[in-house]
Image: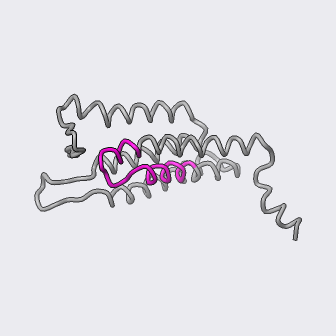
Amino acid sequence: MVATLADEFSDVPDAAQITRIVVRLLLAALLGGVLGYERERRGKAAGVRTHMLVAMGAALFVLVPQQGGMEVADLSRVMQGVIAGIGFLGAGAIIKNHSEEDVQGLTTAAGVWMTAAIGIACGLGREVTALISTVMALAVLNTVPRLLGTDKPNGKNSEL
């Protein structure tokens, strides 16, 4: 029984691999949390926890197959599935009211999608790419509304 348990928990052969897993998942959670905090601060539906879970989940979806030695072509299919699946999650954040002009949640949905991409970058070990992408996403979320004059203090931004 002990041998079976030891065999079941042998997917991480050494401390270097454990460190790699922890760093990638923690960075995904941290970067997702940063984007989620920005959305939560503005009173949007998808906040810190949602963005953290999306980033960590996306990282895990690519990290585990990569650890298992999956070929790049096969890993690209995993990423395609994550990208499509996140699209469904984002669609749940979009609300269309009675008129054509009254659509809400597009920016939140796009942010969740971006968060998944950042999580994938973390899971693949592309930490600098993930950091740069997070900074750029924050710039879009914070600077562009100010430049366009659509930033409102009560968090009611136009999301068209």
Q: Does the magenta stretch include residue 131?
A: no
Q: Which residue is drawn at 85% across and 67% down?
A: 4
Instruction: Report the label total.
Output: 0
- Residue 158, image x, y percentages: 19, 44
Q: Residue at x 78, y 43 (%)?
A: 15
- Residue 84, image x, y percentages: 42, 55
Identify the image quadrant of residue 21: top right
- Residue 33, image x, y percentages: 47, 45
Considering only vertical position in the picture, is 35 above or below 88?
Answer: above
Identify the image quadrant of residue 90: bottom left
| In front of the other: 50 or 42 | 42
Residue reaching furthest to the bottom: 1
Q: Is residue 137 left or right of residue 78?
A: left
Q: Which residue is drawn at 20% across and 39% down?
A: 152
Q: Is residue 52 magenta?
A: yes
Q: Is the magenta stretch mostly helix, strand or loop?
A: helix
Say how the picture is coloured.
one colour
Q: Is residue 96 left or right of residue 52?
A: left
Q: Which region is colored magenta?
A: 36-59
Query: The N terminus is located in which quarter?
Result: bottom right
Q: Which residue is drawn at 24% across and 59% down?
A: 95
